[in-house]
Image (cartoon, rainbow, N blue to C red):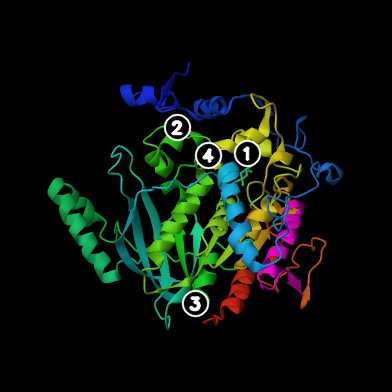
Amino acid sequence: MSLCVVVAGMLLWGGAERAQSGSAPMTAEQDHDNMMKQLGIEALRPGPSGDENAPNHANYDESKANPYPKMPDPLTLDDGQKVTTAAEWWHERRPQLVKEFSEYVYGKVPEHVPAVHWTVTAVDHERIGFRAVVAKDLIGEVDNGSDPAITVRIHMTLVTPVDAKGPVPVLMMFGPAGFPSPHEPSAEEFARINAAWKKMMTAQDATLGQVFTDHPAWEPFHATPFRFPQLNADGGMPNTWQLIADGWGFALIDPASVQADNGAGLTQGIIGLVNHGQPRKPDDWGALRAWAWGAGRGLDYLETDPAVDAKHVGIEGVSRYGKAALVTMAFDQRFAMVLVGSSGKGGATLLRRNFGEAVESLTGGEYYWMAGNFMKYGASKAKFGSMNPGDIPVDSNELIALCAPRLTLISYGSPAKGDAKWLDHEGSFMATMDANRVFTLLGAKGLTMDGKPYTGPMPPINEGILGGQLAWRQHDGGHTDAPNMKYFIAWADKWIGHAAQQ
Ligand code: GCU
């Protein structure tokens, strides 16, 4: 049973109890339940099954995919007035959309988020492919003076080529951080380590001396044998190798070090720290916005590092991190480019579409990615009645539009190779096409193929629309963006005027 306490007009379910007794944090179910109560929701429609053979499987019938065919218009103000100039976009429409996405979809970044203090914890001189690189491991310690029980340490690793002639463009990628290719001791150093180790062991247990004498060739520590890198799905070199070979740097930023990828973690991480360990309020940020915030703090560091061309930092992610990459780019205009990999609902595809993953998936088990308020659109019984995806005031065409006129590549793979239909490639393409109008209004070159503006339909797999600042490509691999990396690099190089360094 959850306990409800009213503190200064704010409902606190369970959290106050926990703060007093120090008992276990809420489970995701309890937290989800708490948010339903805060919103006055009694029942949510269940999300569809991803299993096509299940009776409640998601819709994959294109004729039923558009129950709310009218997308909200990025170029119409809420009062119905049309946006016809760049100035109207920048001063009126964009701020309106930022506010609405914050309030209803991804949640607001609190006004006072504690400062982050970056420290380079170690510097390693490594090789990526054939190029020497400097790898810096970094921790961004969030000031937790307001709540010392909650620690947030953002983990990022920055890797840049040693022989660069100047600051390099950097692609920040959501995923585990850490040294990609640790530099190992030399043969002579290994010999010393082995001798010292044997000496130490013999001091512990004198009989081991005989064992070492009997096996004189045995050395416990030795160099890791060369292993060919794990190739990308298209047989290409790993993304990191391609970036370094082209003269880029990359930064690996660990989303989990900012905010856990689960509902139970909402009273921890950066969201929990700002809320003093209490559950979220309906318009508080969800994990996607928190990860995006973390990427922004990573960029704060990159702006101070002389190896980095901070005007040309991109953000990349796949799947849930593809959503996070798009959210990062949409809100933080310092990011110059984005590679959005297989992002689906909550990412590039239209929330209004009924194809594969549904809004009801994002209000059910995946609720913590979003603002609490987003749950309303999955409600079948609530104090406000019921709502459906057609009630969401904004949609992904407008999220992509928020990236304009900066370099935006929407990427997918092939359903036949495992980039599931669940992701709704078509709906993502529809949103991209519509966002194109904002890119062109702002004077950017929109979707362009063979030198001509692209007008549809969704092109076949492997036919990229890569001629403009808004771009699209579906590769023939699976649930990854790796086969699109070489296209991304060539496309971005052209627009930022970076020459590949072989
Ligand atoms: C699930 C989820 C998607 C998400 C994906 C992932 O499929 O429904 O929204 O993108 O997991 O991140 O792996």
> In 3D space, how far apart are the residues under numbered discs 2 and 3 (Cα atoms)?
45 Å
Closest to the observer, 276 or 343: 276
> In 3D space, how far apart are the residues under numbered discs 1 and 3 (Cα atoms)?
39 Å
> In 3D space, how far apart are the residues under numbered discs 4 and 1 (Cα atoms)?
15 Å
Badge 3 amino acid: Gly
**Is 50 drawn above or below residue 245 in the view shown?**
above
Q: From the image, tell me which residue sits under label 1.
A: 362
**Is 463 drawn above or below residue 256 in the view shown?**
below
Badge 4 amino acid: Asp
Mark 2 or 3, which is nearer the eye? 2
The answer to whether marks 3 and 4 mark residues whose Cβ atoms lie closer than 8 Å is: no
The answer to whether marks 4 and 1 mark residues whose Cβ atoms lie closer than 8 Å is: no
Are there few (<14), some (14-19), or many (20+) residues within 10 Å of tag 3? many
SS class of the residue under badge 1?
helix
**Is 164 drawn above or below residue 363 in the view shown?**
below
What segment is highlighted magenta in the picture? 426-449
Q: Can I make out residue 225 in this image?
A: yes
**Is 17 drawn above or below residue 268 in the view shown?**
above
Q: Which residue is drawn at 45% across and 58% down?
A: 296
Q: Quadrant of residue 162?
A: bottom left
SS class of the residue under badge 3?
loop
Is the CB of the residue bearing disc 1 within 8 angstroms of ligand 1?
yes
The answer to whether marks 4 and 2 mark residues whose Cβ atoms lie closer than 8 Å is: no
SS class of the residue under badge 4?
loop
Q: From the image, tell me which residue sits under label 2.
A: 279
Q: From the image, tell me which residue sits under label 3.
A: 247
Q: From the image, tell me which residue sits under label 4.
A: 283
Q: Which of marks 4 and 1 is nearer the N terminus?
A: 4
Is the CB of the residue bearing disc 4 within 8 angstroms of ligand 1?
no
Are there few (<14), some (14-19), or many (20+) residues within 10 Å of tag 4? many
